[in-house]
Image: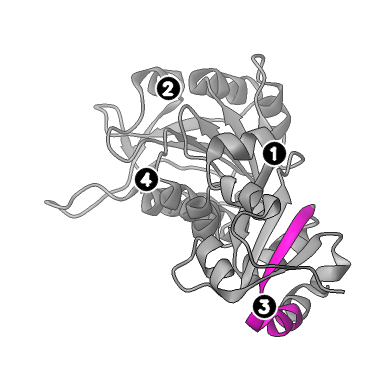
Amino acid sequence: MEEIISSRQNPTVVRICKLSDKKHREAERLFRFDGVKLCAEAIMSGAELEFILLRREQSNAMRLRIAELSGKYPEDTGARVILLENSLFDAVSEEKSPEGVISVAKYIDKFHKIATIDNNCVASESRDGRIMLLEDIRDPGNLGTIMRSAAALGVETLVLCGECADIYSSKTLRGSMGALFRLKTVRARDGAAAVRTLRVNGRRVFAAALTSQAVSLPEAALTHEDCIVIGNEGHGLSGEIISECDGCVIIPMSAGTESLNAATAAAIFMWETRKKN
């Protein structure tokens, strides 16, 4: 028999709604996301789904669509599948025009790690694969877009330094378009230490920063093993991180133009190092 909920005060609904807040996500080690595509991406990646909520009116269509995209019906994922009455689903959804699916999954610890004080996580990821570092990218939409570009352009790991946005926020997830489920991240509070660790392990690290010693991207002779550090949307990179890098690189632009958005700059650097693969 299908489980149907109609009350906003239902304990399960209250619990899931609280996951919109970071402190509740971290306490429960669960995150929520809207949409059929993200649900299918989570299933295909092997993420552990706790709940799949379906809008009652579209429930059969959503079941079929999820199975079409992922190869599994919601009931075959191990998740608790619940139908919400239409008005309740619309109130619970974080989308302006809900598709009819809300999923809740466990944190993906095998992909998304916290660097210890000795930076073991950074060291382990430095041995192979392409890496990009981000410092204080606080806009979740920018972070999600960078994650999406990284997945598309073959960057395996993002090292998130300082106060970057939460990878599990709904805005980051929407921007990443499912890249969260395929891309490794390491959260390193001490960005300078992360840069030092990468260099000790044989990587060259370059700051995307305009300094007197900066070289133009076409002249930098970057390789696919080189790591780029992208800074905060407003004030760029900290002097501490810049001082630990092998050098600084800038993207040549037409005179009189503003600096590029962090996500756009990151994508250009990713493409440039991909070409040298």
Residue depicted at x 42% and y 54%: 268
Image coordinates of residue 93 in percent, x first then y, are 54, 63
Q: Which three-letter amino acid code belongs to the residue tagged 3?
A: Arg
* Mark 2 vs mark 3: in front: 3
Contact between labelled residues 3 and 4, with CB atoms less than 8 Å apart: no
Quick one: SS at disc 1?
loop
Residue depicted at x 39% and y 45%: 139
**Residue located beneath label 3 in the image:** 56
Q: Quadrant of the N terminus?
A: bottom right
Return the disc, 4 or 1, that comes first in the chain's sequence. 1
* Mark 4 vs mark 3: in front: 3
Task: Give the CA separation, mark 1 to mark 2.
Answer: 30 Å
**Residue located beneath label 4 in the image:** 217
Task: Give the CA separation, mark 4 to mark 1.
Answer: 40 Å
Task: Give the CA separation, mark 4 to mark 3.
Answer: 53 Å
Return the disc, 2 or 4, that comes first in the chain's sequence. 4
Residue depicted at x 56% and y 58%: 153
The magenta-colored residue range is 49-65
**Residue located beneath label 1 in the image:** 29
Quick one: SS at disc 4?
helix
Quick one: SS at disc 2?
helix
Whether residue 137 sits left or right of residue 2 in the image: it is: left
Against 1, residue 245 (above or below) is above
Residue 182 can be seen, yes or no: no
Contact between labelled residues 1 and 3, with CB atoms less than 8 Å apart: no
Whether residue 157 sits left or right of residue 48 in the image: it is: left
